[in-house]
Amino acid sequence: MESVTSNVPLPRLTKVNYENWSIQMKVLLGSQDGWEVVQEGFVEPTITAGYTAAQNKALKEMRSKDNATLYMLFRAVDESGFEKIASATTSKEA
């Protein structure tokens, strides 16, 4: 996910550009398979005992997608915006 965005500056949310920023972020996150996790959310399961290898792999991929998306959101807001979402633990919460 980060490979594409590492060379492209992320749009920055400010107090006056939410509409444009949200459109740009939706497309950017969609291109990186992150928009789905923002919309649907990611809930860390409390019990994973008995998961198959495929289920563990899928869980690891979703966790990674959510963390990468959350990181991108952290980077795409100004300081006052970051203060509002800094305690978020999932991209949907942010």
Image: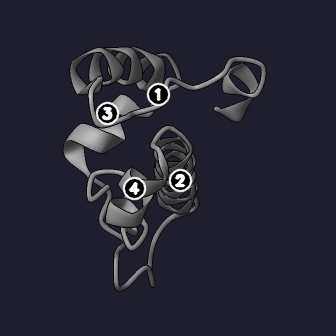
Measure the C-alpha gap from mark 4 to mark 2: 40 Å
Q: Residues within 10 Å of mark 4 (few under 14, many from 20)?
A: few
* Residue 37: x %, y % from top left: 34, 42
Q: Quadrant of residue 23?
A: top left
Q: Residue furthest front?
A: 16
Q: Which comes sooner in the sequence, label 4 or label 2? A: 2
Instruction: Identify residue for label 1.
Output: 33
Measure the C-alpha gap from mark 1 to mark 3: 7 Å
Q: Which mark is residue 36?
A: 3
Q: Which mark is residue 54?
A: 2
Q: Secondary structure at mark 1?
A: loop
Answer whether labels 1 and 3 touch (C-beta < 8 Å): yes
| Residue depicted at 43% across the width and 34% down the height | 34
- Is 91 on the left-hand or right-hand side of 15? right
Q: Which comes sooner in the sequence, label 4 or label 1? A: 1
Instruction: Identify residue for label 4.
Output: 80
Quadrant of the image containing the N terminus: top right
Q: Which mark is residue 62?
A: none
Q: Quadrant of residue 7?
A: top right
- Is 41 on the left-hand or right-hand side of 56? left
Comparing marks 4 and 2, which lies closer to the viewer? 4
Answer whether labels 4 and 2 touch (C-beta < 8 Å): no
Q: Secondary structure at mark 4?
A: helix
Comparing marks 2 and 1, which lies closer to the viewer? 1
